[in-house]
Amino acid sequence: MSSAPLQSISDTYATNGSQAFAGVVHGNVYYGARESSAPQAPPKPSSTVPFRRDPDFVDRGDLLSRVDEQCLQPAGRAALVGLGGVGKSQLAIEYTHRTRERSPDTWVFWVHASNAARFEQGYRDIADVIKIAGREDPRANIFKLVHDWLRGCGGTWLMILDNVDDADFFVNAQAPIQSQSSDSGRRTLRPLRDYLPQSQNGSILITTRSRESALKLSEWNDLIPVDLMAPSNAVELLEKKLESTEQRNDKDLVKLAAALEFMPLAIVQAAAYISQGESRCSVQQYLAEFRESDRRKTSLLDLEGGQLRRDGEAKNSIIITWQISFDHIHRTRPSAADLLSLMSFFDRQGIPESLVRDRAQAENGPGSREEPYSGDGQGNSNEDDSDSDSDSISESDKDNKFEKDIRILRDYSFISFDTNQTFEMHSLVQLATRKWLEANRQLEPGTHAEKGV
C-alpha cells in the first residue's frame, strides 16, 4: 500500500502501531511501518555464553566461591587474573552456567573484550538479544543504549568481559554521545570504561592476564589471582580427559602433570595428543618424548588441539599463548622484555635479584632504547658537585626503571618474588621465552645465552 501525504494538518491525532502523535503538523505526514524504531518487549532472560558447559571441569578450591561472593554484592565486580593458560576463561564459563542453573531469571552476557572492535560487537549482540529500541539507527550510540538498559533493567544480570589483556582501549578509546544541550550538533566524548554500569542489580566478571589491566576496570579487592592447579586437581583433569584411554598408569599421570607444571591448557594439549588422531600413544610414551629434549618439548607444546571452550581468536598452544604476551610486552616496554629474556637463561628457582639488577642496569644504561640517558654519556662534568648529583640521579632512574620492568613481568605472572630476595620462573615459561627469542632472531652470538648466563 502506498503512503499518501496529508498537508498542513491541524489538531491531528494519528496512531501508528504502538506510537501516537498529536498536535499541529506543518508538512507531510506518512502512514507506514516504523518497525525499526518501535519498542519491542524483551524476551525472557537468557544466556549469550557461546560455550557449552565442560563435563570435565575440575573445581579448584574456593575460586568460584570467591567469584560468587563478590558478584552477588550490589554492583559487584570480580577479576580473575593469572598467566595465560591457567584456566581463567574456563572458570568464568563454569560460573555462568552455575549462575543460570541457580537463577534462571538472571541475564548472562558474554563479551569478548580483547579490543575495542570486539567489545563494540559484544554490546551490539546484547542490544539485539534484548531488543533495544533504536539499536538499528546508524547514528545511535550502542554503548549508551546498552548501558542505560542495564542500569534500568528490573531483573538481575551478569556480564563477562573475557580476555581483557590490554585495557588501554577502555580508557583511551572514546565513544561519541549526542549532547543534551540546545545545540544538537555538539557531541561530547566519554571513555568506554564509563559504559560498564555500576548497577545495584548487575555484576561484572573480568578475565585478564594483566593485573594492571584489571585495576583499570576494578579495584584491588576485586582481584582474584588464578595460579597453577593443585597437583591433585591437575591429575584429576588428566584422568577426565583421558577417560577412554587404555593402559593408563596413575604414577605416570602424576609424573606428566608435574612435567607440565600443573598448567591446565598444557594438560589439555597433552591429553589431546595422547588420545586423538594418528598420534595415539601412551602417557608413558608421551612423557618420554617430552623429556627427550627442549626441541621436542617445544614441538609438543606448540601443537593446538583439545580445547573447544576458548575464544576463536585465542590459541590452544600454550607456547603461542605466552608468546603473544611476550610480543605485547616487547612493544610496550622493551626493557621489560629484555629482562625476561635475561632471566630465561638462569636456573628457574632462586634467581638472585642483585645479579639480575646489576646485569639489567649494565645493559640498560647510557644509550638504552627505553629512555634517554640523563647524563652526558661519559660521566664527565666541569664541577664535582654536579657530577655527583648526575650520578645519583642516574642510579635513581636505573632503579625506578628496573622496578617498573619487574612490576610488568609480575603483573603478567611470568615471574614471582620470594622473601629471600630471589625471583622464580616456570621452566615452561623460560622455554617459551627462549623459543620466542629464536623466532625473533635475538638468540645469536653475543646474547645472554652466549654470555654464559
Image (cartoon, rainbow, N blue to C red):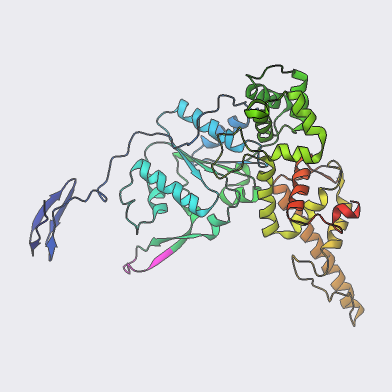
The verdict on residue 30 being magenta is no
- Left or right: residue 259 versus residue 210 is right
Is residue 150 visible in the rendered structure shown here? no
Q: Which of 429 and 294 is in front in this view?
A: 294
Q: Position of residue 436 (x, y in %)?
A: 73, 50
Q: In which quarter of the image is residue 154?
A: top left
Q: Residue at the spot x=11%, y=54% of the render?
A: 2
Question: Which residues are the magenta region?
Answer: 181-188
On the image, which quarter does residue 358 sit in? bottom right
**434 displayed left or right of 309:** right
Q: Nearer the viewer, residue 301 or 159?
A: 301
Residue 142 visible to the viewer: yes
Q: In this view, does 108 lie above or below 328?
A: above
State how many labels appear. 0
Q: Is residue 439 left or right of residue 91?
A: right
Q: Position of residue 173 (x, y in %)?
A: 51, 59
Look at the image and say whether residue 187 sits in the magenta stretch: yes
